[in-house]
Amino acid sequence: MSAYAALDDWVDAHFDDEVRFLQALVRVPTDTPPGANAPHAERTAELLAAMGLTVERHPVPAAQVQAQGLQSITNLIVRHRFGAGGPTIALNAHGDVVPPGEGWTHDPYGGEVVAGRLYGRAAAVSKSDFATYTYALRALAAAAPPRRGSVELHFTYDEEFGGELGPGWLLAQGLTRPDLLIAAGFSYQVVTAHNGCLQLELTLHGLASHAAYPETGIDALQAANRLLTALYAYNGVLRTRRSAVAGITHPYLNVGRIEGGSNTNVVPGRVLLKLDRRMIPEEDAAAVEAELRALIDGAVAQSPGVRVDTRRLLLAQALKPLPGNAALVAAIQRHGQAVFGEPIPESGTPLYTDVRLYGAHGVPAVIYGAGPRTVLESNAKRADEHLVLQDLRRATQVVARTLRDLLDGP
């Protein structure tokens, strides 16, 4: 029996266990905010230890976590050395996720399986790849162990807030320095580039006054309206800046939150906006921020008496392909076509992820894991998020085969 067939058979034989593992992970909430994620890490560590894996718990200091507006983070590392020499390949997935919101027809923490789909918050993004990567490693160790190299599992809990206390913290602390990385993704494409993201918080200050005497106040909401008009018009400019990366079109801006005013009979004296500016890989982040700040200042200047405080919430650099990722891409494409029966294209994605933090440390990385062709198909970050279990099975086989090739040669 070939190594690949042995790996496939092992995954098939243990697939029910893999599904139960994913169900157990979905049933422990990791809503971020509020970001109380240490309990999920502890439960994950217990489950991994029961499989015979040695788990390192790396709690992030409470002061750092709370400074980000979160409650608790414990990142996990599992290290498995097969033999001297060879590369170290890390597999990273994040356990934190946005709250479930409304509209669910299945329990968001139930892990219910219906018609071959597992439902629950983070079932697709990305607790699914806790399962993919754990069972790919177990299959490799049990059915076709290579003669050299190492595999590390990195299970982290800060992707929704940028990743600096997840992979960023592990790398900054010197707790890991892999040679290659595969990070949580979907099954039908291997992603090698993604957008960057700049998030800003804008606070417009006017002067509150009684609505019966509006001339005695300075309306911050009216100024915010002028600013919003300028920001949305800016999207017309951004649509003309096209990316050469397949899967990525152009940059864009979204205003995701507005707060302001105190009552219906009061001229609003303060309005807060939070915006998200996606950056294509060809853009320079510093230039993007300078251009956007100038646009904001110019628009607010049209409202006499109003001032704006601009605070950066997040600056996530784009992921650009590193030359060393070619072996990763080739192996995933080769085995993806063999297992799924169709080509697995290389592409970019308009999302941003914490994979960029590995790239910033010079680690060649790709994004590949269990999931559908698009984010929308899985309802990720929406009601009734789900994972097609056949995608989980086959992605686990692809990752196990890929690890075998990279550690021992095809």
Image (cartoon, grey):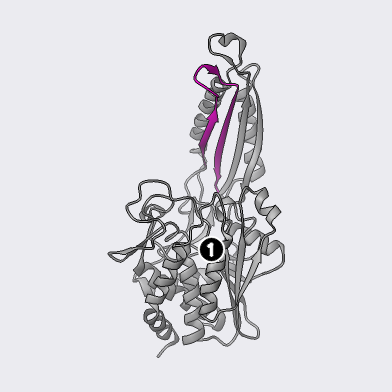
Q: Amino acid at mark 1?
A: His
Q: Kindly identify which residue carries mark 1.
A: 40
Residue situated in front as seen by the camera: 378 or 406:
378
Q: Position of residue 7 (x, y in %)?
A: 43, 82
Res. 32 in view: yes
Residue 327 visible in rendering:
no
Label 1 Cα neighbours within 10 Å, binned few <14 / some 14-19 / many ≥20 = many
Picture residue at 37% right of the left edge, 74% below the top: 339
**Residue at coordinates 52% horizontally, 36% vertically from top-left?**
257
Q: Position of residue 280 (x, y in %)?
A: 55, 47
Region in magenta: 252-280
Residue reaching furthest bottom?
Answer: 1
The quadrant where residue 294 appears: top right
Q: Is residue 370 magenta?
A: no
Dominant secondary-structure state across the stretch colored magenta: strand
Which quarter of the picture shows residue 168?
A: bottom right
Q: Position of residue 259 (x, y in %)?
A: 54, 31
Q: As drawn, is 267 to the left or to the right of 382?
A: right
Relative height, residue 254 to residue 389 (above, below): above
Q: Nearer the viewer, residue 242 or 87?
A: 87
Q: Secondary structure at mark 1?
A: helix
Q: Quadrant of the N terminus?
A: bottom left
Instruction: Give the vertical position of 293 relative to 183 (above or below).
Output: above
- Tag count: 1
Residue at the spot 49% in from the left edge and 80% down from the top edge: 138
Q: Residue furthest left?
A: 115
Could you say which is closer to the camera, residue 175 or residue 253?
A: 175
